[in-house]
Structures are given as C-alpha cells and as structure tokens.
Image: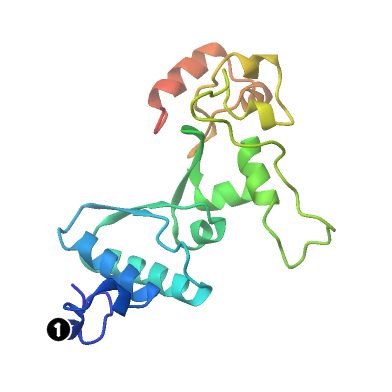
Amino acid sequence: MLRLVGIASPEKRVHDYPFQMSGGMRQRVMVAMALSCQPKLLIADEPTTALDVTIQAQILRLILETREKVGSAIMLITHDLGVVAEVCERVVVMYSGKVLEVAYVNDLFNHPAHPYTQGLLQAIPRLDDTRDRLSIIPGSIPNPANLPEGCRFHPRCQYAEERCQTEQPPLVSPKPSQWVSCWRVVGEKGVDSDVIAATAVKAPLNV
C-alpha cells in the first residue's frame, strides 16, 4: 500500500516513526492506512490542512488516482472551495449541522441558490476582481449549544424574513439536480405547499 501511494523505499519507510517523515509523506501514509481495508467509501476530512500548495496538489492527485485504482467512492470534507472545484463532482453545503444546498459542482459555482453559498463564493478573491474589498458574510457562526430557531443561517442572512426566524425550510428542488433549503427560493420559484411536501420526502440528505 505504501508503494501504491507513492512512497519511495516502502520496505524501509514502514519502520520509520512519524517525526521522521514530512507532512506530505505522513498524509500519504494515512491514505494508505485508510485504503488498506479496501473501503467502498473513503471519508477524507480536511486532507490538505496545514500543507503548502504544492503538497496539497500532490495529495489531491494521489487521492483521485488511488480512487481509480481501488474503486472507492470519496466523501471529501473541506472548507476550501478551490479544492471542491478541482476534485468534486457533487457538493453538499452545510451550515451548523444543516444541509443548505446540494448540487453538481458546475451548477453550484455557476448558479448558487442559497444565500450562504452565494456569500462563500463572493468572498473568494479573483484575478479579474476590481473590488477594493472582498465581500464578507456578517456575523458569526452560532453556538452549537444555543442554535437559532428556524433557518440557522437567518441571523446572518440579508434576505431573512419573519418566517425564516421560526420555520426551518425543507430541501426543495428549484431545478433538476439542485436542492436548496431556503424560503426565498421557494417564494421566487412559486413552489406551493404540496410540491414542498413531495420534494422534501425525495430530497437527498434531508437532515
């Protein structure tokens, strides 16, 4: 497995201690350990944290190449939207434990529907951006021990209305392959209560 993830001289390295390896090499060992059981699903939680950009790219390429060789599906957990754009096929956007949007990666980046997703994308610096300051999402993440009623994002949402403060919106599908939990989207698309009930039952990851 060490050879599979690109570690040179695996017969020697298998006896090394972690402090004798670089950060990138330790990440490779972790990938090898995870794949040694031949999982059908590999959960990679922030696999590139604390690595420089070059090593990040190597680890991401390694994970994708290994996926093809082993045949495992990958669930990537990350806050880095650049990583999401590069390696993911389908994206689930979560906030304080709630799913706010589900979409294929191209749909999410080109047509974000939830205000939180829009805020995240607007905060990304771009080479062609002429703004003096990047956009920010006002406020702070709520305390998990004291979560707000209704939509958990409403205290920070510029579009929040009274209903958002008391009712949690279900995941509905404004268009095929995209699901959003937002009363504003429901109102704009003219989705009635019967459609909400039907789509909420079929919605992916409706937690």
Type of the residue with mark 1: Glu
Left or right: residue 169 compared with residue 137: left
- As helix, strand or loop, the secondary structure at mark 1 comes to helix
Which residue position holds label 1? 11
Reply above or below: 20 against 44: below
Viewer can see residue 206 = yes
Foreground residue among 8 and 167: 8
Quadrant location, the C terminus: top left
Foreground residue among 159 and 96: 96
Determine the residue positioned at 40% across, 33% down: 204
Determine the residue positioned at 18% across, 72% down: 1
Instruction: Give x and y (percent) for residue 154.
Output: 65, 26
Reply above or below: 31 against 107: below
Instruction: Give x and y (percent) for residue 149.
Output: 57, 18
Left or right: residue 95 compared with residue 67: right
Left or right: residue 47 compared with residue 184: left
Foreground residue among 7 and 176: 7
Question: Pointer 1: residues within 10 angstroms few (<14), some, or many (20+)?
Answer: few
